[in-house]
Image (spheres, rainbow, N blue to C red):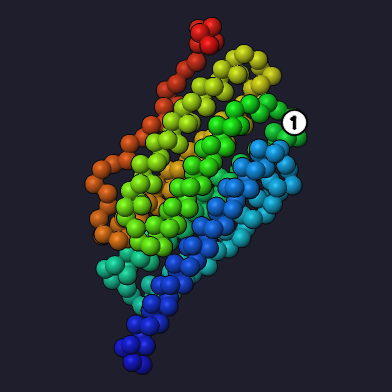
Amino acid sequence: MSKSHIVSSFNTDLKHLRNLVLNMGALVEQQVLQATTALKEEDRSIAKRVLGGDQEINALEAELNDAALKVLALRQPVAKDLRNVMMSLKIGGHLERIGDYAKNMARRTNTITKADAFTGSIGTIVHMSELVQSMVSNALKAYNMRDIELAEYIRAQDENVDQMLNTLFRELLTYMMEDPRNISGCMHLLFIAKNFERMGDHVVEIAQEIIFLVTGNWPLEKRAKYDKTSKMIVTPNDLENN
């Protein structure tokens, strides 16, 4: 077998890995969008589609894992090619987790809708979703184009997701203190908002892995975290001041 044929076959294998990651990403974007639509419209049929769509993402991740292991075993890549395979595997894992969060959101939407629970503050959650969807889309673009500047931009965007969570956390705690009947719905909304914050974290990890894939170095500056919810307390005085 000629050297040129071997190189061509190897490039085909790497392209296949890239396409699997991009296909996973497209499905994940769709899942997040549909889960958000289900919550906004209180539509359990859309939520059910999200639950079913998760299996397709899992199947693609399994295919990605198998393809990557085959490349490692048969091609024994080194340097940038090895980073390509390993980072594609890791990125696929992050995408699968984002899909899991979308599935969890759909389950909570079903619960909220069945119970006719409190659904205030959905507007903020929708804004969080739109930002996370934009981050996922940019991450896929950065991965496909090997664009480290776009990857750095994604890392900076995560601050906005954290700040939205801080605002929503305080707002929903206030609603719960005002009326105990709001507690059930607000708790589910808090978990959904936290899901989006975690999605943002996974996208940032993808961005960092893209930077490593292209440069061979991890970002020098650690990503700052602005999620303050673990230290936040709302008191009765806060209600009086609102």
| Camera-nearest residue between 176 and 134 | 134
Direction from residue 195 to residue 73 in the image, left or right? left
Q: Secondary structure at mark 1?
A: helix
Q: Residue at 59% across / 32% down in the picture?
A: 123
x and y percentages locating residue 42 in the rendered image: 71, 38
> Horizontal and vertical percent for residue 164?
47, 31
Return the residue at label 1. Answer: 115
Along the horizontal axis of the image, is 98 left or right of 116? left
Kindly tell me whether residue 189 is visible in this rendering: no
- Count all numbered tags in the image, as a single digit: 1
Q: Is residue 67 above or below residue 33?
A: below
Going 61% across and 42% down the picture, which residue do you hit? 36
Q: Residues within 10 Å of mark 1 (few under 14, many from 20)?
A: few
Query: Is residue 68 toward the left or the right of residue 80 in the image?
Result: right
Q: Residue furthest bottom?
A: 1
Quadrant location of the N terminus in the rendered image: bottom left
Quarter-of-image position of residue 108: top right
129 up-or-down from 49: above or below:
above
Left or right: 168, with 12 as reference point: right
Position of residue 146 measured from the top left corner of the image (x, y, whole percent): 35, 61
What's under tag 1, amino acid-wise?
Ala
Identify which residue is drawn at 33% across, 87% down. Answer: 4
Q: Position of residue 186 (x, y in %)?
A: 62, 26
The residue that appears at 53% across and 67% down in the rendered structure is: 63
Q: Is residue 155 visible?
A: yes
